[in-house]
Image (tube, rainbow, N blue to C red):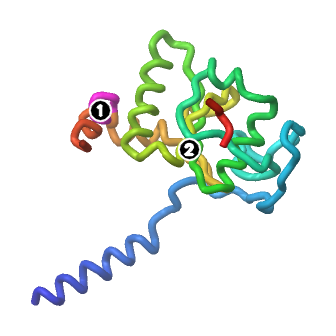
Amino acid sequence: MALIVVVGAAVGAALALAFRPPMGIAVPTSPPGQILPIGSDPGPYSTDPPTSGAHFPIGLHPGFYDVDSASTLPANVAGYLVANLEQGDVVIWYRCEPAPGACAEMTDQIRTTMRLLGEDRIIAFPWPSLAEPVVLTSWGVGKSIWRSMLQRGYRRRELVCQEEQRSSSTLR
């Protein structure tokens, strides 16, 4: 009897995984390997924020970039960020809301999430042209996580509680 339950559960889990909807919105990718000389203009990307395309041979160091630190970076920063995507990093693009305190709360949530997930392959970067406040990208995939987090009821307090339970260059 126990074997039938275990086999049935395994089959059910496999079917659920096989037919679940994709995590994000898959977009056509540009061919990988379109490497440009550093400082050149990568031109327009097919998505905003970019999920693939022409890029520089190096990316940015993982971590959280606020508006001030982002403004000190070299021109055509998207070329560096797309290099990160091709190398397997995830970029959390964010756009601060003009409401008082909204930016601080959102960026605190992003920083907490990065600490929970491990910051070694994640970059958070301000991107003012976003349609959503937060978009998560990997090579060829974009996902609006802000709405997902709110729908699941996550608030800063819960993320901090979860975190407490888990005990000179910007280019790499």
Q: Is residue 146 above or below residue 72?
A: below
The numbered mark, 2 or 1, whose residue comes first in the sequence reads: 2
Q: Point out which mark residue 16 bears.
A: none
Between circles 2 and 1, the one closer to the viewer is 1
The image shows residue 72 at horizontal and vertical percentages of 70, 22
Residue for point 58% across, 31% down:
94
Question: Tag 1: residue type?
Answer: Val
Q: Residue at x 46, y 26 (%)?
A: 106
Q: Is residue 158 magenta?
A: yes
Task: Tell me the quadrant of the picture where the N terminus can be found.
Answer: bottom left
Left or right of 1: which side holds 29? Answer: right
Which segment did they paint magenta?
155-159
**Residue sitting farthest toward the top:** 100
What element does badge 2 sit on? strand
Q: Closer to the camera, 147 or 39?
A: 39
Residue that label 2 marks: 136
Q: How many marks?
A: 2
Q: Residue at point 49% right, 46% down?
A: 120
Q: Is residue 146 toward the left or the right of residue 31 in the image?
A: left
What whole-number distance in Å separates the C-alpha atoms at marks 2 and 1? 20 Å
> Foreground residue, 105 or 82?
82
Name the residue at the front extreme: 168
Residue at image mark 1 = 160
| Residue count near mark 2 (Cα–Cα under 10 Å), binned few <14, some 14–19, many ≥20 | many
Residue 110 position within the rendered picture, expressed as x and y whole percent measured from the top left: 46, 33
Give amino acid for label 2.
Leu
Please, what secondary structure does the residue beneath circle 1 have?
A: helix
Give the position of the C terminus as an image quadrant.
top right
Horizontal and vertical percent position of residue 16: 38, 71
Q: Position of residue 77 (x, y in %)?
A: 75, 34
| Residue 151: quadrant of the picture | top left
- Residue 35 shown in magenta: no
